[in-house]
Image (cartoon, grey):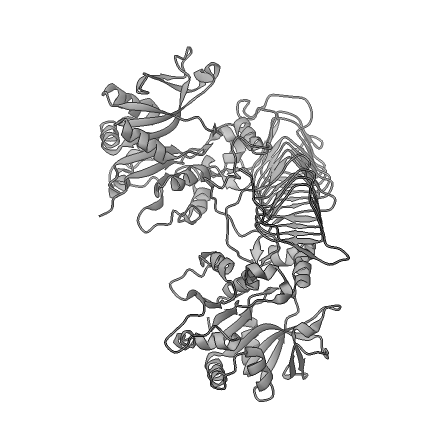
Amino acid sequence: MRAIGIILAGGNSTRMRELSNKRAIAAMPVAGSYRSIDFTLSNMTNSHIQKVAVFTQYNAKSLNEHLSSSKWWDFGRKQGGLYVFTPTITSDNNSWFRGTADSIYQNLSFLKSCHEPYVVIAAGDGIYKLNYNKVLEYHIEKKADITIVTTRLPKGEDPCRFGLIKTDVDGRITEFEEKPMVATSDIISTGVYVIRRRQLIELIERCAQEDRHNFVTDILVRYKNLKRMYAYPLESYWSSISTVESYYRTNMDFLKPEVRNYFFKQYPEVYSKVEDLPPAKYNPGAEVHNSLVSSGSIINGKVENSLLFKKTFVGNNCVIKNSIILNDVYIGDNTYIENCIVESRDTIRANTSYIGEDGAIKIVVEKNERYVL
Amino acid sequence: MIKKEMIAMLLAGGQGSRLGVLTAKMAKPAVAFGGKYRIIDFPLSNCINSGVDTVGVLTQYQPLRLNTHIGIGIPWDLDRNVGGVTVLPPYEKSTNSEWYTGTANAIYQNLNYMETYNPDYVLILSGDHIYKMDYEVMLDYHKANNADITIAAMPVPIEEASRFGIVVTDDKKRIIEFEEKPAKPKSNLASMGIYIFSWPVLKEALIELSDQSACDFGKHIIPHCFKHDKRIFAYEYNGYWKDVGTLGSYWEANMELIDIIPVFNLYEEFWRIYTKSDTLPPQYVSGKARVERSIIGEGTEIYGEVYNSVIGCGVTIEEGAIVRDSIIMKDSVIRKGCQINKTIIAENVEIGENVVTGVGEFAESKLDKKVYAFDLVTIGENSYVPPNMKIGKNVAISGITEADDYNEGALESGEYIIKAGEVR
């Protein structure tokens, strides 16, 4: 392979509200039995990228647990492998990663020790399938300095939380605005970039000299007229889960047969850590409609238009509607849950009710004692 | 210097002919069980959970599925630098090459394998039982008794004891008598086919009986050691243990997993059962679907109704189909409007639209009345059943069948269609 991979997974988003207290966004559980970084990692391995570095910083406990073995994504090889880089104090540096560019700068020795000519940089929170080789071919064909994978945002979405891009007819980027106040385009950056390795080292080093730390605002936006930057349009499904609303909507998308079919029944596959949980169990009284149920779950109540992640226990006479129940949640008898996201490892007491009012999504965090054998 | 205190030898070469078409193309230990497992997962998981990290798996009959399932043992953490899992098929020798002719003969032919690990004890297991057992506790018991051989035995109802090999013990649990399927049993302790041997005793017995044809543990090795006054003890086991040797017991053991609190509980954190599984998405249950009293594997999509059933991974049950009291394995498809009753459907089978199974009066199977009993319909892997067929009880189907193979759209109770040709 001609490229190495870098996954930026250190981020936190206040727009994820309580959900981000517990883990970095890249470790958010998605679609019942995956975590968001699985999609990017699977894209990397399916594109035959054999050397992948994951940069973590914010609350990486869940992420590190998830990445404890690289074998699930087939990275456990003699050649290459999966490298997880967290900020460390060294003789000449004692700060955290001050930004995405700084995280690369602090690990520049990794980048310098590689021999592959190109680098694919990707965010850890994108839900999509993409063969990075196609982007690389495009990058070479256009003789680009930097290629940015872009997508057209669906109607009704607020583009102002993304980087907005305008191109000429050839695909060359003429305008790049990061999180503008007023949207002038619906073409956004997906946070996936292809760049020549030496070029990247040069840009990152100059950036560091000038005491700048952000890859997007300090490199992409500032260099947009100086360097040949091209947009590679991604036509298929893409979603970023960095707000509660988009997280909820992305998960609910998997209730649609076409989305499941695209991700799970078509080549290439999406890989994740395999957890050896028993099959889901439906007891008398279970009534499940239009829902996804993951392994290890036991259902005694009613579940509608919802996602049950791994090891969910639903008690007798429960009603769960339009909700997302994350991993290892115990829901006591006679509970009513509607329009909620229930945080993982919660214990919901019997006879309680949680409702997200007026279309708003309620996040439920309930750390009660669990008296279960 | 390689040294393992105890290694396990897992006998997985048998056909399991009483599972009929299910074992036409695979050995019994490779047959799917409980939605996402295969039978061999249980002894293999027991091994690693008991701290036994060196396992020789003896294969002979149709080993392909078993080999691909075991691989290098990653799912059970049996991929080790020293030890781990090794698949041991029969092999050619410079003189007298032969197949494995009996359980003990198979072990005898792998003396070299066992020698490599320089063990103190050898655990002999069979690959076709469903149970959870801590072999380390059994080993402690073996050591405490200063035993030569320890045989795991479980109490069975005295009226059923005549179906088993029965051991009679003194008050210290030392075995004083063996009875193979006795008419009037003197005890209700049945041997489970799980043995711990002190290595020198096993080695000596295997070499002494090396000329015995079809040398078997129960028939030859144990009686031989008994005759030579070896210390043989019974280790009483009181948990769940099931020999899934017949279609009836196989079906029953699957159905027991559905109980609200199953006797054999797969949901305990402790003593987890591992299996090779692909990364699969969650299962989808549609708006019109109905699922009750069932366990369902990953990646399955249900648009119809499922009651009292065990459904594997990647299965599709289309709208209007009703499945009751059945076992459906991996990747099978049940088309619209089917009614599936008390049917075992193996892997990768397609059942055409509006097929009805398991209806009509009882009739003895014309293929083999001992195998295809229990009112079950059994459909072998990779089979196809054309639309609108009516299928009775005690029926066996294997292969891509066409409407012409059926008697005016029906297959009466006791009938069979075997297209593959090599199935008994």
Residue A49: x %, y % from top left: 48, 67
- Residue B232 shows up from this direction: yes
**Residue drawn at x 51%, y 32% as measured from the top left:** B264
Q: Nearer the viewer, residue B308 or A54?
A: A54
**Residue drawn at x 39%, y 15% as measured from the top left:** B187
**B364 to the left or right of B169:** right
Quarter where residue A81 is shown: bottom left
| Figure check: B111 above or below A229 | above
Residue B74: x %, y % from top left: 42, 49
The residue positioned farthest toward the right in the image shown: A358
Quarter where residue B198 is shown: top left
The residue positioned farthest toward the bottom in the image shown: A226
**Residue drawn at x 46%, y 68% as measured from the top left:** A53
- Residue B27 shows up from this direction: no
Quarter where residue A193 is shown: bottom right
The residue positioned farthest toward the top in the image shown: B184
Q: Nearer the viewer, residue B410 or A66?
A: A66
Q: Nearer the viewer, residue A26 or A333?
A: A333
| Figure check: B205 above or below A277 | above
The mark tally for this picture is: 0
Residue A279: x %, y % from top left: 57, 42
| Figure check: A209 above or below A90 | below
**B217 to the left or right of A320:** left
Q: Nearer the viewer, residue B271 or B29?
A: B271
Residue A360: x %, y % from top left: 73, 59
